[in-house]
Amino acid sequence: MADDKKIIFSMVGVSKTIQQTQKQVLKNIYLSFFYGAKIGIIGLNGSGKSTLLKIIAGLDQSYQGNVVFAPGYSVGYLPQEPQLDDDKTVCQVVEEGVQYIVDALAEYEEINNKFGLPEYYENEDKMN
């Protein structure tokens, strides 16, 4: 089966009731996602969008019905109001999330700066 026809996630008959208020926010939901699909979830405030996403991401286990992932696939969840470290700036938090890129850029900058130093550009071994 081609990857674009492979179902990697299914939700079968999922319902969710908020225990404190007894409000049913999801009722008998059926979903399937194909590999590579781009989805959007829209609805009014309080209609269950965040709850649905938390169930899809595996963060909410208190529902009725079945949620199935194909082996080797998972979903991440970025909350609408993430809890950030108060001791860090927004820039520091973002850099921490992409640290491997920050490290690669720092290494690139270090190498680039060495090209301008006579001890490097005059030494063939160091240039290599």
Image (cartoon, rainbow, N blue to C red):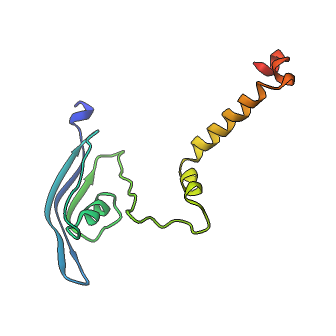
Q: On screen, 84 above or below 23?
A: above
**Residue sitting at x 27%, y 66%:** 51
Pick the front one: 41 or 15: 41
Instruction: Count the numbered circles shown.
Output: 0
Image spot of residue 67 (x, y percent):
24, 58
Q: On screen, 64 above or below 96?
A: below
Q: On screen, 97 above or below 108?
A: below
**Residue sitting at x 29%, y 46%:** 70
The answer to which image quadrant residue 46 occupies is bottom left
Pick the front one: 119 or 128: 119
The answer to which image quadrant residue 115 occupies is top right
Quarter occupied by the C terminus:
top right
Pick the front one: 115 or 52: 115
Image spot of residue 71 (x, y percent):
33, 46
For the view shown, which residue lies furthest in the bottom direction? 20
**Residue sitting at x 72%, y 30%:** 111
Give the side of residue 29 with respect to residue 95, left or right.
left
Image spot of residue 126 (x, y percent):
81, 22
Quarter occupied by the N terminus:
top left
**Residue sitting at x 85%, y 18%:** 123
Give the side of residue 100 with respect to residue 1, left or right.
right
Image spot of residue 44 (x, y percent):
19, 65
